[in-house]
Image: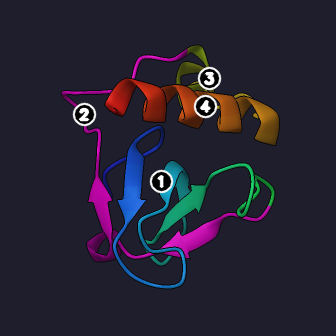
Amino acid sequence: MYDYTGWIVRSNAGRDKDGIFCVIGVDEQQRLLLADGKRRKVAGPKPKKLGHVCCLTDQLHMYDHPVIEKLKQGKALTDKELRRALAAFRAKEV
């Protein structure tokens, strides 16, 4: 399966609808593992099917942030770092 790690997505379905998350991995059932550092921690990400999210970034239009680069390199990430990266993305998006 394609590597979606580091992509920023918006949830289209479920109780977290319209929430902005970062993809921190993919599980063995081909579901995206989403975290935002607040409701969904890095230690307990939300598994979600690709069809239930809207991709705000992709391979050609990656969000350039040091925390995202750290995640893509496979290094450990804290919830605080992820929250700051997503807050910067939201500020840039508006």
The residue indicated by pointer 1 is 20
Q: In which quarter of the image is residue 39?
A: bottom right
Q: Quadrant of the C terminus?
A: top left
Q: Residue drawn 47% across and 78% down?
A: 29
CA distance separating discs 2 and 1: 18 Å
**Left of 32 or right of it: where is 54?**
left
Which residues make up the magenta segment? 44-65
Q: In which quarter of the image is the N terminus?
A: bottom left
CA distance separating discs 3 and 4: 6 Å
Q: Quadrant of residue 15?
A: bottom right
Q: Residue drawn 39% across and 76% down?
A: 49
In this rendering, the answer to whether 20 lies above or below 56 is below
Q: Which of the marked residues, 1 or 3, is nearer the chain's N terminus?
A: 1
Q: Assess whether residue 12 is covered by the magenta stretch.
A: no
The residue indicated by pointer 3 is 67
The residue indicated by pointer 2 is 59
Query: x%, y% of residue 64?
Result: 42, 17
In this rendering, the answer to whether 93 lies above or below 17 is above
CA distance separating discs 3 and 2: 16 Å
The residue indicated by pointer 4 is 71
Task: Label 3: state its secondary structure.
Answer: helix
Task: Label 1: state its secondary structure.
Answer: strand
CA distance separating discs 2 and 4: 15 Å
Q: Is residue 78 visible?
A: no
* Disc nearest the viewer among 1 and 3: 1
Q: Which of the marked residues, 3 or 2, is nearer the chain's N terminus?
A: 2
**Left of 13 or right of it: where is 21?**
right
Task: Label 4: state its secondary structure.
Answer: helix
CA distance separating discs 4 and 1: 17 Å
Residue type at mark 4: give it.
Leu
